[in-house]
Amino acid sequence: MLGARTGGARIEVSRCIAASLKCQTACEAGMARLKAQGIAADDEAVRLLRQCAELCELNVRALQKESRLSRRTASLCFELGNQVARAAWLEAQDPDAHALARDALHLARACSPLVFAA
């Protein structure tokens, strides 16, 4: 019974998983872009994207396994997705950064029903 521990319906869990996978890919691509531009791996922007990619991966695993911690990982994705979206939107005015912002914001929106479920 997928989603029973999160209080979410199966479709909401599936949406959060799909958004997490897409955001993970976008964050990994963003890290690669920044590194290609010569930005150090310990730079704040690179660290934020690394945290986002790793958290997205953890969230997918927690939701797929119906972990008791899945509601917490979804909550963290909601928070971090908003942070990444804001940073990507404000940091650069290029299409890649805006696509990252869109994917991160989509993550936050897709996981919010799991966070705020009764």
Image: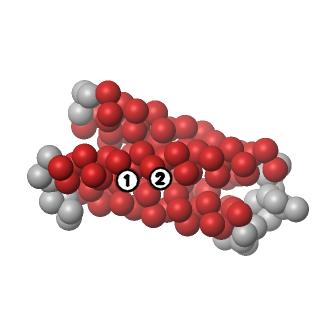
Per the image, label 1 sits on a secondary structure element best described as helix
How packed mark 2 is, by other alpha carbons closer than 10 Å (few <14, some 14-19, many 20 or more), is many
Which residue is found at the position 44% from the left and 58% from the top? 53
Residue 48 occupies which quadrant of the picture? bottom left
Q: Position of residue 43 (x, y in %)?
A: 19, 58
Quarter holding the N terminus is bottom right
Q: Quick one: 14 or 81, which is closer to the camera?
A: 14
Q: Position of residue 98 (x, y in %)?
A: 36, 31
Residue type highlighted by circle 2: Gln
How packed mark 1 is, by other alpha carbons closer than 10 Å (few <14, some 14-19, many 20 or more), is some
2 horizontally vs 30: left or right: right
Which residue is found at the position 73% from the left and 51% from the top? 13
Q: Quick one: 74 or 15, which is closer to the camera?
A: 15
Per the image, label 2 sits on a secondary structure element best described as helix
Is residue 82 at least partly visible in the picture?
no
Is residue 22 at least partly visible in the picture?
yes
The CA distance from mark 2 to mark 1 is 6 Å
Residue type highlighted by circle 1: Glu
Residue occupied by mark 1: 28
For this orientation, the residue located farthest to the right is: 1
Which residue is found at the position 68% from the left and 44% from the top? 15
Q: Quick one: 24 or 107, which is closer to the camera?
A: 24
For this orientation, the residue located farthest to the bottom is: 68
| CB atoms of marks 2 and 1 within 8 Å | yes
Q: Which mark is residue 39?
A: none
Q: Which mark is residue 24?
A: 2
Which residue is found at the position 49% from the left and 62% from the top? 55
57 horizontally vs 85: left or right: right
Q: Position of residue 76 (x, y in %)?
A: 54, 58
